Image (cartoon, rainbow, N blue to C red):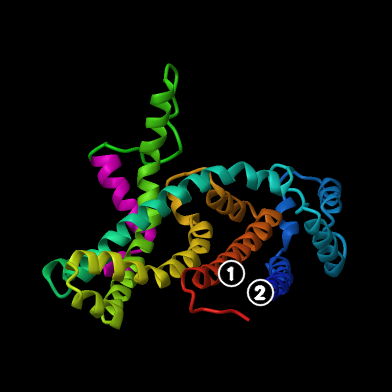
Amino acid sequence: MRRYVIRRLIQAVFILFLLSIGLFALIHAIPGGPERVFLAPHQTAAARAALIHKFGLDQPLPIQYWNWLTGALHGDFGLSFTDNQPVLSDIFARFPATLELFVASLSFALVVSIIFGVVAAVRQYSITDYTLTILSYLGISLPVFWFALILQTIFGVQLRLLPVFGQSSPVTTGFSVFDHIQDYAVHLILPAIVLSILFIAGWSRYLRSSMLDTVKQDYVRTARSKGLSPRVVFFRHALRNALIPFITVVAIDFGGIASGAVITETIFAWPGIGYLFYDALNDHDYPILIAMLLFAAASVIIFNLIADILYGVVDPRIRYS
């Protein structure tokens, strides 16, 4: 296992290195390049040249990449073009909001997908199974932005039950600690549901298939022949083993959740790194874009490695060499 992990980590470093080269070249291949950020209507040529020199954009591209790479290896991803602050400072300032949304949506998706998957497997080919199947296909096929706008219209505009943007109310004067927690919770409901809906649809279908495949195994038939109740056979024996491949799928999708909140955070104005990416894209803030794209790629690689490790832990039959 140790040799396998070391080999995968070396591969991950090599992949990230190639990605960094591709992203850096792609950013500079955009018409106008990063220099277009410093084009202002009333800006003098001397002021613009000074800014370009400050950010090192007047040097050859290989030199720019080398300077960026050496800085990144020491934790310095440069300065933001927008606020002139270190890139990592801007990202870390937004990361807690994304982490909170990530934990809430992930928890909700796990609970609902397990319930839906188990119920659909228990009641195979019933009306309940067909209904959950239709709902799953709708969840997979519906665009995230459209679903978010529908929820905003229904619960925020028509029913006025839930807020539709931000992390807290604009006016919190006189709020107690409980009021702040309640205010934050109601702001979290809609974005968490929107972010989790796609994963609920996919995970529930995967768990249903895994459960149906598990109940056909010999050890399940043996448990039934011993006179165990269907509930014990289904939940103690079948579900426990059906969760083995399910865990790996969830772990692989972790990276997708962590890096795929751009649309959700933008629509709900949730002040996380997804919203930061959207702002950086609009402002052509290339240092932040490169850093966030690399972090997204790193999260996918890391969670894929975690999924492989978990698969070997939960299933003793798996051996890595």
Q: Residues within 10 Å of mark 2 (few under 14, many from 20)?
A: some
Q: Quadrant of residue 226?
A: bottom left
The residue nearer to you, when weighing 205 against 17, is 205
Element assignment for label 2: helix
Measured from the top left, where is residue 104 in percent x and y?
42, 48
The residue nearer to you, when weighing 136 against 150, is 136
View extreme (top): residue = 174
* Residue 8 disc label: 2
Q: Given the image, on which type of amino acid does mark 1 rest?
A: Leu
- Asked if disc 1 and disc 2 are in contact, CB closer than 8 Å, the reply is yes
Measured from the top left, where is residue 286 in percent x and y?
69, 57
Query: Is residue 102 shown to the viewer in this render?
Result: yes
Residue tagged by mark 1? 305
Q: Is 145 in the magenta?
A: yes
Which residues are drawn in magenta?
134-158
Principal SS element in the magenta part? helix
Q: Given the image, on which type of amino acid does mark 2 rest?
A: Arg
Residue 233 appears left or right of 26: left
Q: Is residue 76 above or below residue 171?
A: below
Q: Is 301 in the magenta?
A: no
